[in-house]
Image (tube, rainbow, N blue to C red):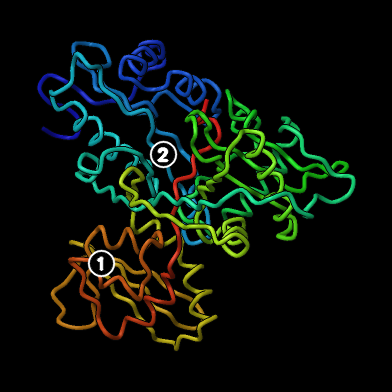
Amino acid sequence: MNARTAAGATARGARADEWQACRDLCERAGQNPSLYDTLTRTDPEHVPDYVRVVDAGGRPVSLALTIPRRVIVAGIPVEGAVIALVGTDPAHCGRGYAHLLLEDTAAFLRARGFRIVLARGPDGLLGRFGFVPCLDDYRLEFRRPPPGADRPPGGSRWRPLEPGDVPSVARLFASASARTPCTVVRPAQPWVWCSGKAGSGIEVLEAGDAILAYVRYGDESERGAAFGVAEVGATATGLLPAVLARVAEKAAEAGRELIRFSGPPDHPFARLVELRLSATVGVRPGVAGQVLLANRGLLMADLVPVFSTAAARRGLPGGTRLVLDIGPKRIELAYSAGVVRLLGGRAGADPTGVTRLSAEAFTRLAVGSVAGGEVDLLPGTTVDPDHREVLEVFFPRAFPHWSPAPYWSA
């Protein structure tokens, strides 16, 4: 088996005239055809080649949809992609087509220069292609607070999202998620925020012509479940108590005593409910949220300005070097005259001066799910003692998080 053909089947990009066949396949494979419609018919960046298929007997029998998106890493957006709607026709399961499909998809995204790829799926399958399960599922649960004095500013009101609100809400989302690695940057376009059921689950706090805050509520399909809050954004932290009061009102209307916020623990709203209401923070391992660093060198090149700023702020001395061997490849970061320079090459057998990481350890380090000062806790890792400080400076702890756009609920 190779990346393109196997047992009479070929992995390739879909053709424009196969749109309906791919949609039918998506439905037969148990995926969401409405989401397929949104992402292939509405997204202006979509081209047929982004639908990867396995062709057996002249027709698609396995499918994966790739979505080009910028993804936040170390506080900056880099070129990335999301893999969605992966499935195989039940009549063709058990023939290795899923393996062939994902092999082709990973190769296709690498060839296109994407730095990072996000996917949801079984760890055992995706792990064969370099994906690492490090997008944790955060859940902050707290009891509904009683009505209080935290009211929105005078002259403001809560109302449902309208298409004209999207640019303001997109800015609030970007501001609230700027520190969260693996956040997918959302275009400020109505189809991203208002498709399907998405817009009906979002409220905004309006004052005159200004949008002060927004809330996206979670799925309430489970009877007796906690009242879900998926996202919160506000122009100022002082507005968050008023947002909490509105969430409590909506939970009371739904007859729910327990409220669950699914954002990361360092989100401003999460900090509010931790400090005020002693929210219980739950973290489930990210077995469904997977990350592939498709181009490590290009990603590190993108992050050089971030490293330079961190080194200057910490006061690292000129001449500081960090040499990382990841499998057969070497990445070297050298700091001098206020600038970090990136060098690459092949890994060596140097007895000292090198930190050796597994591919999984480097992925976790790059997205912040493990801090530079604790990376040696992971298996397959050897940290040079002289590198400990620079690792801590370049790679602080963060909370990578899977945060799909509202249209995922379409």
- Relative vertical location of residue 228 with respect to residue 10 in this rendering, above or below: below
Residue at the bottom extreme?
A: 317
In whole angstroms, how far apart are the C-alphas of marks 2 and 1? 27 Å
Q: Residue at x 70, y 55 (%)?
A: 240
The x, y position of residue 297, in whole percent, is 35, 59
Amino acid type at mark 2: Val
Q: Residue at x 30, y 19 (%)?
A: 29
- Relative vertical location of residue 126 with respect to residue 263 in this rendering, above or below: above
Q: Please name the residue that numbered disc 2 is placed on.
A: 82
Would you say the residues marked 2 and 1 are in contact, meaning their CB atoms lie under 8 Å apart? no
The x, y position of residue 88, in whole percent, is 25, 22
- Observer-nearest residue: 265 or 94? 265
**Disc ID at residue 8:** none
- Relative vertical location of residue 302 with respect to residue 324 in this rendering, above or below: above
Q: Residue at x 21, y 70 (%)?
A: 381
Q: Please name the residue that numbered disc 1 is placed on.
A: 330
